[in-house]
Amino acid sequence: MESIAPLWLWVVFVVFVVTALFVDFVVLKKQGAQEVSVKQAINWSLVWVGLSFVFNVLFWFAIRDTTGSSAIANEKSLEFLTGYLIEKSLAVDNIFVFLLIFTYFAVPAAYQKRVLMIGIVGAILLRTVMILVGGWLISEFHWVLYVFGAFLVLTGLKMWWAAGQEPSLEDNPALKLLRKVLPVSKNFDGEKFWTVENGKRIATPLFMVICLVGLTDVIFAVDSIPAIFAITKDPFIVLTSNVFAILGLRAMFFLLQAAASRFHLLNYGLAVILVFIGSKMLLIDIFKIPVAVSLGVVLSILAITMIWSSKTAPNT
């Protein structure tokens, strides 16, 4: 796997991610177990989106200086932007599942941000491994692209079918397995994952939540990573667009939590995006859809779905 990004930019990216996570953990520790307000969620969301665009500008200059071509720099920065937007959009589906998990276990709002922070770190590590493996597979076996494409189309169709149904955790096999393997207390013990009852050390409901959030990360990584490979094969762009989308996940969760009812039809739009990206992959050797067109299609689908959701929201 080869990347157009220079080595120093890889170093800058790693340093930035480590620094960002450190700052986020420090802020989280200082705040303690308290609920995140909508204002805080908006401010942090703007910060993460802004940093993503700043990084893309830096990426543009790095590619231009490396290749000596503004045209190549434009193309690669557009690939990053498109990948970032797709991953950010698909992250919305993660958030709706997180909302379901938190509601099912009645997780106090003050404890939710710690769970999300741990989930974000786990998602970054997991996706890094999956991206490297996926990139190697594509470079060695071109036909894997068709497998990814077919998988995305089927996933999109399944998502469309399930969008209008009421989600439930009652029949979740992972939850049933966890309950059989682990004794779990009936009540939370602050932000602890383990507690002691009758002299025995057992898991708290918060530990169950962490396990399910981790499982959700795995499931959605399987969906979203093939989607970005339809836009670019450069491992640097695939990784950075994924990570920057994930970094703002905690803030976006609390933002969408307050407005979940206004985006009740968004899953239909995400389903269409997956089918489009999957079809783009399946047609890659017949007709290559330009990145700018892909970006326009994704933006249009999101805009239409959000407007549609707002006009048909239950509370309007």
Image: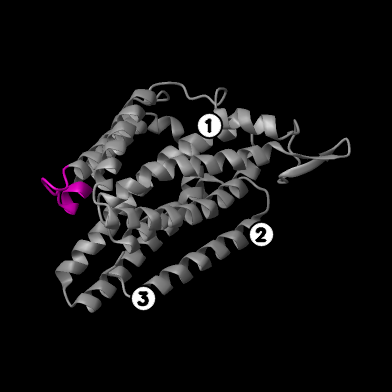
In the displayed structure, 69 sits above or below 32; it is: below
Eye-nearest disc, 2 or 1:
1
Instruction: Determine which residue is flagged by label 1.
Output: 100
Say which of 113 and 17 sits in front. 17
Instruction: Determine which residue is flagged by label 2.
Output: 30
Which residue lies most toward the right here?
Answer: 199
What is the CA distance from the residue labelled 3 to the residue labelled 2? 35 Å
Secondary structure beneath disc 1? helix
Q: Residues within 10 Å of mark 2 (few under 14, many from 20)?
A: few
Left or right of 78, for residue 54: right
Return the mark for residue 7: 3
Q: Amino acid at mark 1?
A: Leu
Q: Magenta residues, as a range?
A: 283-295
Secondary structure beneath disc 3? helix
Q: Can you give x and y, in whole percent of width and height, for residue 159 in the image? A: 36, 30
Left or right of 303, for residue 213: right
Residue 49 visible, this angle = no
Say which of 203 and 302 sits in front. 203
In the rendered structure, which disc, 3 or 1, sits on the residue that comes first in sequence? Answer: 3
Eye-nearest disc, 3 or 2:
3
